[in-house]
Amino acid sequence: MAKPIAIKKGFDIKLAGSPNKTLSDTPLSEVVALRPPDFLDVIPKVLVEVGDNVLAGQAIYFDKTRPTLRFTSPVSGEVIEVLRGEKRRILEIRILPDKDETRYVEYIRANPANLNRQDILQQLLDSGCWSYIRQRPFSLIANPLDTPKAIFVSGFDTAPLAPDLGYIIGLEKENFLTGLVVLRQLANGKLHLSFGRSLPESLTEAELEAVGRVHYFQGPHPAGNVGVQIHHIDPIQKGDVVWYVHPQDVIIIGRLFREGRYRADRIVALTGSSVTAPQYFRMMTGQRISSVTEGRVTGDAFIRYIQGNVLTGTTSAPSEFLSFYTNQLTLIPEGNQPEFLGWLLPGFGKLSLSRTFFSWLTPTRSYNLDTNEHGEKRAFVLTGQYDRVLPMNIYPVHLLKAILAKDIERMEQLGIYEVAEEDFALCEFVCTSKIDVQRIIAEGLEYARKEG
């Protein structure tokens, strides 16, 4: 076993509402939707019309700038609506699923170890599974014409209330290992697999070493972020391209080659203090969120529905649909109540990275937090807080100021190509000035991409 890479900077936010290791199937909602806005820098061109009957795995739209990049239906059924927004931008393509049995497009069933790179790449593109492979920098869908420096898979997640990826991998171990073989072929053998202090019980080091190089990390969040792992294993330089894939997406890719069909269901953790019994549910990509949350919400208070975790997730609503990359739903109370005297009160039930309150006396305690920011936006104060929670050899404040100044040369020198919004999420959480740090990073990455 390799020596673990120790991450000392960071902070674990312990929240109430961790999921129990109980898995339930969720009935398919009455409508399933494909959402082109889930994908950055994709301009959709629809291939179907309202009234068409489609199969699971059939192409519904493609990217105008990259026509080989196709997006396929997760279910079989009838196309009932193409929802458009401003300037006729396509927001959703809604499908009425078949009630009796899902009909699939049949793809090749084969051991990917016996296929060449081009055959694997073509099957991924045809089935729509290529969209699961993303690249750094910029967190875009990977370009199939590129040859990556390496491919990374993070087998553990340290975000608040994150699903136990070891538990999920254990449910479909063979599909996961098959998916890793696919990635090894695409990476020409340069596949990096990262885990926490130990491997999941279902996997052995010999099985993983047969397809890639295994790394171990220990330390607080964001040790589980793939960007932090890339930084410590094989940092990105200007001109480098690195691909990464989430373990659940590795499983879906493995299904494609073992079963010969695109089966887009995934295991989603329903978490948070506003959930009656947090646990795992098998859901279909594009399924309506209310199909899993209805009847499982506590109290009458206003609730924030989040697709993802509380640091990096997006605010949603029960009537909306599960996004393409979502593996976690978090429900917490809205912070819409004024707080008498604010920080002047002792704050025995409050969480703080500093010793302003008393949370440092009970480091293992879980907190029932809401969305209140506890203060208004202020001037950009230099406090050194960012450096305490960002375990990367980067000057975070200098980088943020270079982005605000649109100084592309300075941004490159300070490591803009190594980071993504999620890597700076803790900086935003601890920020005294209430700066929208993740938004600034996103704007910087977009500016660097366009300038490049």
Image: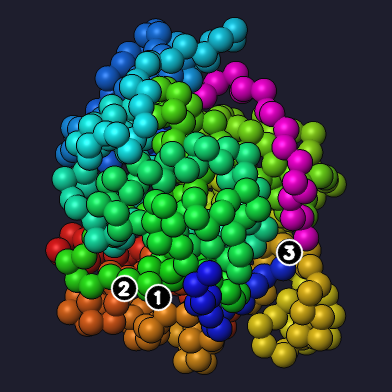
Q: In the displayed structure, would residue 71 be above or below residue 405? A: above
Q: Label 2 is placed on what type of residue?
A: Pro
Few, some or many residues within 10 Å of mark 1 (<14, 14–19, 20+): some
Q: Label 1 is placed on what type of residue?
A: His
| Residue that mark 3 sits on | 15
Q: Does the magenta stretch include residue 26?
A: yes
Q: In the displayed structure, would residue 41 be above or below residue 71? A: below
Query: Chief secondary structure of the magenta span?
Result: loop
- Residue 198: give x, y in percent of width and height: 61, 64
Marked residue nearer the N-terminal end (1 or 3): 3
Q: Nearer the viewer, mark 1 or mark 3?
A: 1
* Residue at 76 percent of width and 55 percent of height: 17
Left or right for 415, reference 6? left
Check whether the beta carbons of the residues at disc 1 and disc 2 lie within 8 A of each other.
yes
Residue nearest the observer in this picture, 396 or 245: 245
* Residue at 81 percent of width and 44 percent of height: 277
Would residue 318 be seen by someone viewing this image from the given angle? no
**SS of the residue under disc 1:** helix
- Residue 194: give x, y in percent of width and height: 48, 62
**SS of the residue under disc 3:** loop
Which span is picked out in magenta?
16-33
